[in-house]
Image (cartoon, rainbow, N blue to C red):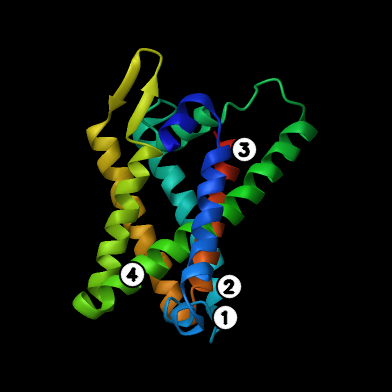
Amino acid sequence: MVLHANQYADYRFIGLIMLVSFIIPFVFLNKRGMKAIGWNQPKSYKWLSIAFISGCLYAYLLFILGKCLYQDSYQNWYVYIANSYKIPTDLTIEAKRQMFFIMAGTGMLFSPFGEELFFRGIVHQTFVSRFGNRGASILDSSAFALTHIAHFGLIYLLDGWHFLFIPTFIWCFSMYFVSRLFYFFKVKSGAIWGAIICHAAFNLSMIYCIFYQL
């Protein structure tokens, strides 16, 4: 679905999958299960603020890295993702601002809730009893990184699909590390909210870079 969205700029089904990912834990887990995956009141609101700032900074540093290595070529992850958005070049300032707020709003709501409840919640907790929290974090972060090859790595150009080995490795490593960062803030805040807020801030900063820095 992500590959299809990148090719045709149709993200409706992606939003639906994220919504389902958010709903599923509430359907299949009881109150104790929800608490086990971190759905509870944060123990430290200070760490939620730090999580937001860290998510914004990480996405911006990833933007700088892409610009330094690949400038405005399709090998730059943000450039490729921006092209998949199909942002019209003739937008007025107001229209561009409105489109930015829509994209940022959906980016801060759908994937942070859906992906964090799934990866840092269900997937993580599934492996804790066997591998411990550190091992479970390595596994859920690896899964998170590999799935994001669909966003960048296996790319669609006019002549078909291509796999970019080195840019994909950098992108996946970056997704793995940011995933560990999401887990770090889950632990520090004492709730899944730390991961959700850091993820939402990352998406906000990434979309800002796409709209106003490229």
**Residue 110 location, x and y as percent?**
57, 53
Residue drawn at the location 31% of the way across and 60% of the way down = 141
Badge nearest the viewer, 4 or 1: 4
Q: Find disc 4 in the rendering and name its residue.
A: 124
Tell me the CA gap for discs 4 and 1: 24 Å
**Residue 7 location, x and y as percent?**
46, 25
Q: Image height check: is 25 above or below 93?
A: below
Q: Which of 44 and 118 is in front in this view?
A: 118
Q: Is residue 79 visible?
A: no
Q: Find disc 3 in the rendering and name its residue.
A: 212
**Residue 179 location, x and y as percent?**
37, 60
Three-letter code for the amino acid on which mark 2 is drawn: Ser
- Secondary structure beneath label 3: helix
Residue drawn at the location 27% of the way across and 70% of the way down = 136
Neighbour class for label 4 at 10 Å: few (<14), some, many (≥20)?
many
Question: Quick one: label 1 or label 3, which is nearer the N terminus?
Answer: 1
- Secondary structure beneath label 4: helix
In the rendered image, the residue lying farthest to the left is 130
Neighbour class for label 3 at 10 Å: few (<14), some, many (≥20)?
few
Three-letter code for the amino acid on which mark 1 is drawn: Lys
Question: Quick one: label 4 or label 3, which is nearer the N terminus?
Answer: 4
Badge nearest the viewer, 4 or 2: 4
Proximity of marks 2 and 1: CB atoms separated by less than 8 Å: yes
Q: Find disc 1 in the rendering and name its residue.
A: 46
Proximity of marks 4 and 2: CB atoms separated by less than 8 Å: no
Three-letter code for the amino acid on which mark 3 is drawn: Tyr
Question: Quick one: label 3 or label 2, which is nearer the N terminus?
Answer: 2
Question: Quick one: label 4 or label 2, which is nearer the N terminus?
Answer: 2
Q: Based on the displayed image, in which of its 4 quarters is residue 211 positioned?
A: top right
Q: Find disc 2 in the rendering and name its residue.
A: 49
Neighbour class for label 1 at 10 Å: few (<14), some, many (≥20)?
few
Tell me the CA gap for discs 4 and 3: 35 Å
